[in-house]
Amino acid sequence: MDRIIIPFPGNEKLAAGIAGILHIVQGEFSTRSFPDGESYIRLLSDIKGKEVIIICSLYHPDEKILPLYFLSKLLKDSGALRVKLVSPYLGYMRQDKQFNPGEAITSEYFASFVSQFADELITIDPHLHRRISMDEIYSIPCKVLHASGLISQWIKENVKDPVLVGPDSESKQWVSEVAREANAPYIVLEKIRHGDRDVEVSAPGMERYKTHTPVLIDDIISTARTMIQAAKLLADAGMKAPVCIGVHAVFAGDAYEELKKAGAAKIVTCNTIPHISNGIDTKWIITRAI
Ligand code: R5P
């Protein structure tokens, strides 16, 4: 089957990298908002009889999901055989239970919507915490890729005597994996979240690693409160300034600046969301999965 790759705005660089490795032609569409806020979509490439690979990282998902739906419908109406959605960052994965009575479990609703218009989904380190598999909420085939190998490689090449630090129990899954691959020790902090921007962390057994460089690793850096509290705790314990690594650079508001101010020696993220901190290229693992 012939293939063509179409980037959503903001994903052009990653798409060009993938298209270059795979020698796949890049297609185009244009999109804009009408004065009333509705979306306009126009396909500019011939996709008839092809599999279309859309690259669309779903950060700020509310502003992207409807244009993405329109584009997918248009592709099918124009003769595309399959729509493969590559969302290096997949939004709406964290509201995966009712934390308070009456709340919507939006991860389920979002998954059911995407499953209606994409034939397949490829994503990187989705926030699977209380769920084990994407199949619990997505009814289309999903390939879950992991950035742990790329992160451990980056640590091996860039950090001397690292001790990997997971800021909360949820991070243990990838911190332990990265530590194994980087051949480095790791510790996991204990976190209590009191509110969106109110996070408390504690660190049992950290004193052993005073001469090491702490490398904080998390899947998502959003408000950065989790990393900031962890960095403060490390500073209070007399540890060196940490290198902060996030898979997904969500960085809400001034979170990036705040994290820098909190004493991060360096902040590095994967390019699943375009950001100035991107230092780890995921095009290789995406290309393999495609
Ligand atoms: C928690 O569920 C995640 O693994 C991250 O720790 C969390 O999303 C980070 O959020 P924030 O940057 O807002 O503290």
Image (cartoon, rainbow, N blue to C red):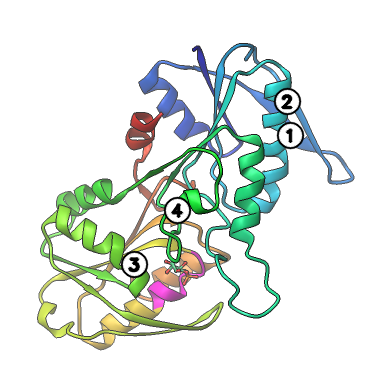
Is there CB contact under 8 Å for labels 2 and 1?
yes
- Residue 54 vertical position relative to residue 128 in the rendered view, above or below: above
Q: Position of residue 17 (x, y in %)?
A: 41, 28
Label 2: which residue? 74
Cβ of mark 3 under 8 Å from ligand 1: the answer is yes
Secondary element at tag 3: helix
Label 1: which residue? 70
Determine the CA span between mark 4 and mark 1.
24 Å
Determine the CA span between mark 2 and mark 4.
27 Å
Determine the CA span between mark 2 and mark 1.
6 Å
Label 4: which residue? 126
Secondary element at tag 4: loop
Q: Earlier in the sequence, mark 3 or mark 2?
A: 2
Is residue 275 visible to us here? no
Residue at horizontal 13 percent and vertical 79 percent from the top: 210
Question: Which of 171/184 is in front?
Answer: 171
Is there CB contact under 8 Å for labels 3 and 4?
no
Residue 227 painted magenta: yes
Is residue 51 visible to us here? yes
Secondary element at tag 2: helix
Amino acid type at mark 2? Leu
Q: Position of residue 196 (x, y in %)?
A: 56, 77
**The magenta segment:** 222-228
Q: Quadrant of ligand 1?
A: bottom left
Label 3: which residue? 171
Badge 1 crowding class, 10 Å Cα cut-off, few under 14, some 14 to 19, many 20 or more, is: some
Q: Check the picture and name the quadrant holding the C terminus.
A: top left
